[in-house]
Amino acid sequence: MGRENIEKYSLPYAILKPVLGLWHSRIFYRRIIVVGKENFNQNDHLIFAPNHQNALMDALAVLFSLRGQPVFLARADIFRNRFIASLLYFLKILPVYRIRDGYDTLKNNDWIFNKTVEVLKNKNGLVILPEGNHEGKRRLRQLKKGICRIAFQAEEASGFSMNIKIIPVGIEFSHYYRIRQVLTVVFGKPIEVSDYKSLYLQNHVHAINDLKNRLSDEMRKLMVHIDSTDDYEAIDELRIIVNGKYSDDIKNPKLFRDRLLIEKINRLAEAYPETYRKLCNLSLKAGRLAGKLKVDYRLLEKERYSTARIIRDSVALILTLPLFIYGTLLNFIFYIIPELISRNLKDKQFYSTIIYSVSLGLALLIMPVYLILALILIKPWWLALIVFATIPVTGIFAWGYRLFYKELKGIIRINRYRKKKKNDFTRLTEIYREILNIIHNI
């Protein structure tokens, strides 16, 4: 399946997608929250427009939230290697050429445009990341006009009969670089391109700009958008301080809590600039102290943790230590090799992409070997299959065990700080309470 028939159904792709999706949605992330799929009918002619902060993981977030075989557009420079290009075409990704790729290459976009029209007619779903490139900041940047041009030109080519809808998409990662995090994907309500037909026929430029501005406004409503450049770090830290404990909340996703918090902070900046400045300063101080003391904000909610809880958790860790060792030994290679490969990345936003891709590749190579060894060494065969099935399960358990151990260490550390009345910790708790009090009052 190459670029010539990229819009056609691919059986190898259909077989591979669930495998990639299993690793993405069950192994790499501990939870995926998808909101708003009821806003559109996937049998319509659709263009999906997600924000772009985390390299390939943004595209995968959309891919594994949709059924079928959507087609993606990506920058052309990643297609320079012939083998990689063939792989990208198999994965239903098409290149878009820019002036920086060479003026002569721009003529290739004519063929790409014609192919996107075929994709839309075939109702695959076309995914375009309208910011053009990624940035590891929780904000929506200036959108490129390409997505609007493609939408209008595709409608024009069909005599405005396709009724193309652009679906704004908000994507939020609880952490960009760590595995076993929470991914939230929010699909907004459709923007019908035909609403701009009259304006487009009168003035192409005005119609493109109006559609682009509306799309930008709708995307901001679905994502965490920190508009302030000067106070970005402070506001981003406030999200963690106030809402960090809600990362796994499905009923009221943290993304919406963060949006509400940022709206409150923005109003505070306008109405009470002095209190806003104080809040930002407190946030930065809290971040520095928490990092220095190695304290998780979520552990500051209680005044003190009981000795009984510490003993209980310690016993649980001791009793499950063999299971942790078993899971670690059999899954260690999936952790260490991707980590070594990604260690010297210049662009940190590719970190998750490399970890996901390399660990998946290793799994596809090594898991069949594990299965063969299990069938050879363990009898009867059904017991061998049970043991084989425990490998990924105990790998996930081992990761959770590490987090549980880290939390227990944090609790013991906090109790020690409180007992010794450590000045930095006392100051951190005071700042933490003051921040929550200010947020509560606004």
Image: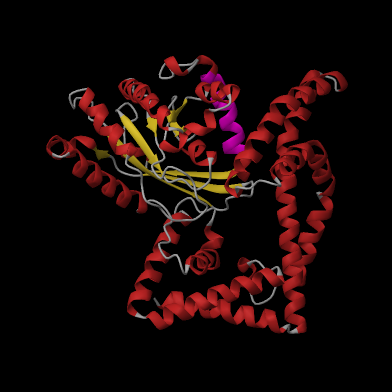
Residue 428 makes an appearance in the image: yes
- Give the quarter of the image for residue 333: top right
Q: Is residue 342 above or below residue 78?
A: below
Total marks drawn? 0
Q: Is residue 245 above or below residue 435?
A: above
Q: Which residues are magenta?
A: 13-26
Q: Is residue 199 left or right of residue 80?
A: left
Residue 361 locus on image (x, y percent): 68, 29
Residue 27 makes an appearance in the image: no
Pick the quarter of the image with the C terminus: bottom left
Q: Residue at x 65, y 66 (%)?
A: 296
Taking the magenta stretch, the answer to whether it contains residue 24 is yes
Q: Is residue 152 above or below residue 171?
A: above
Name the main secondary structure of what is drawn in magenta: helix
Q: Residue at x 43, y 77 (%)?
A: 276
Q: Is residue 261 left or right of residue 291?
A: left
Q: Residue at x 66, y 46 (%)?
A: 345
Residue 81 locus on image (x, y percent): 58, 26
Q: Is residue 349 left or right of residue 48?
A: right
Taking the magenta stretch, the answer to whether it contains residue 16 is yes
Question: Observer-nearest residue: 362 or 187?
Answer: 362
Residue 270 locus on image (x, y percent): 33, 75
Q: Residue at x 18, y 27 (%)?
A: 160
Question: Observer-nearest residue: 92 or 366?
Answer: 92
